[in-house]
Image (tube, rainbow, N blue to C red):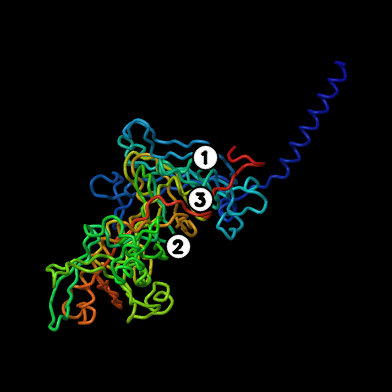
Amino acid sequence: MKKGMKKTLLASCLLSITTANTLANGLVSMTDEELSAARGQALISMAYTAPKNIDGSAGDGSGSGSSGNYLNYGYYKLGLEAKMELNTNIRSLQLGCGGINGAGQCDIDIENLSLSGPADSVAADGTPIWTKGRANTSALLTNPFIEFAIKNPTSAALREVAGFRLSAEDILGHLSAGTLNDYNAATQKSTGGGINTFSGYIQVAPTPVDAKTNPSIFGTRYDEMIFANVRINTLWWNDRSVFSSPSSMTGVVNNPNKASSNSDQKIYDNLRKNSSNQGIYGILVPQQNVSFEFPQTAVTGNRMSQLNLVVNDVPIAPIAIGRDSGGVFMALDESLLGVPGVVFFMGADGAGGTQASCAAARNTANCSYITNLKVNATVKENFNLVHNLPISSGGYLSLQKEALRWPGSSSAFTYNRTTKAITNVADNYSNTDSNLVFNKGDIAQPGWWLSFKDPLDFGKLVPTNNIPMDDVLPQIATYITNYLSNTPTNNIDIDFGTAVTLLFGAPVFRGLGDIKLSDSSRAVMVMENLQLNNYQQPVSNCFGNLKFC
């Protein structure tokens, strides 16, 4: 056996010598000029970005300081010239917890985080679709790299690391958080987890919103009181002021069987009914569609738990009100012939004055319409209820000890309300045009920071619950009062025949036509923590029936 081993070793040595001679004979020497002309691509690349001042001139590298010069660092970048595929699930991602943030508080806290390839399409109800299954796809990271921000990079004595980031030149994938698109009213969060706190920068692409309001009762609360001027003809005109009187609209109206006159019966029949078929006061404002589009918006900050989006001047379709919408008791500031006030219906007494008729065909003679209503809408949505973040551009995760701007990060920009144009501006831009909405740029704040370069498309925001109108109705009451207080143009005139019937308790049926609110009138509508439809339905990134793995 030993003799065989010796023969094998001898043969191997001879083969190695022969191969080495062959390779050596294959090498060709090159001149410096020939080496310079050669082209190729390295697997690993390095780059350096010198410090800059706000005006673009060379900086001294001393950091941001009090000047707000967030680019005044030297940036050293080590990159991989390759494409990397990644599919991952993270049960709990918590970064920057405790310390200066306080016990239990984190810069970034996300439950049930999944990263995969992008969805192939979207179902009719908005749910993302992966034809081969989400778990069979991977996010694509092009040219991933790590970069360091160095303060005083040219001084061996003073240089220090101010921060680092993990990133890629381009990222294409789908990020989701949580396992269920539901809503717990007690916690105002999803029971399937999601984004609890977020520190970073997100641009939200133009986002359509399609919501509906709750039908609401109007006119019976003190903060919904309406004031108006009337003229009552009792052979001569009597000027009076009237106001809706909540104290006169408590409880229910008397049983119609005990009605003392036909006029009392009319009041009852045209009032709304409760579950016991008893007449109750108040004007029913029907459900309204509220459809608008949020402009492109930047959301940035530390330890955010809520997504705040604002859009102004959202038009609301005319609100049609008829006689069967209900009535309110209008008290006279001074009784007339012993009459303290009347029950008032905002529609004519007849088929043409019903709410359905008024809504179907515009009829200013018999109906009342609240027109020119605009609202400034605010959406305050817990990040925990936003589950899907499709990514189609670069992004990064960084840690820094002071505020700085990473090279290539998103610029500050303005949004033009009229033209809807997006214009990049400097970080220190001073906005003087009321038609421009200024959005901050991506300036990474101390701590952990997650940023997405280009706008994220959240799809369509369609709340599954209707929007309460409780806060909007008092504002509308004020605007209606302003309209009816315009004397004598918008006076309510009561002719002699109607005035006589008031002595016997008869109501007033009167369509007020267009109650046109002033152009400057804006109601504030807040939509808070609304459960969204299936555009925000997280899809499992697991094989089989597992929700998370």
Q: Decide: marks 2, 1 in contact (CB < 8 A)?
A: no
Spatial CA distance of label 1 from label 3 is 12 Å
- State which tag comes first along the sequence, 1 or 3: 1
Horizontal side of 184 relative to 478 (left or right) equals right
Spatial CA distance of label 3 from label 2 is 18 Å
Of the two numbered discs 3 and 2 in the rendering, the one whose residue sits closer to the viewer: 2
What is the residue that sits farthest to the top in this orientation? 2
Label 3 crowd (10 A; few <14 / some 14-19 / many >=20): many
* Quarter where residue 204 is shown: bottom left
Secondary structure at badge 2 equals: strand
Of the two numbered discs 2 and 1 in the rendering, the one whose residue sits closer to the viewer: 2
Question: Looking at the rendered structure, which numbered label has been put on residue 210?
Answer: 2
Label 1 crowd (10 A; few <14 / some 14-19 / many >=20): many
Q: Estimate the x, y position of residue 157 in percent, counting from the top left.
A: 31, 34
Residue in view at x 66 percent, y 54 percent: 131
- State which tag comes first along the sequence, 2 or 1: 1
Secondary structure at badge 3 equals: strand
Q: Nearer the viewer, residue 441 or 474?
A: 474
Give above or below for 259 relative to 300.
Answer: below
Q: Which residue is mark 3?
A: 388
Q: Nearer the viewer, residue 173 or 229?
A: 229
Q: Amino acid at mark 1?
A: Asn
Q: Estimate the x, y position of residue 151 in percent, counting from the top left.
A: 33, 41
User: In which quadrant will I find the C terminus?
Assistant: top right
Give above or below for 103 relative to 334.
Answer: above
Secondary structure at badge 1 equals: strand
Q: Which residue is mark 1?
A: 112
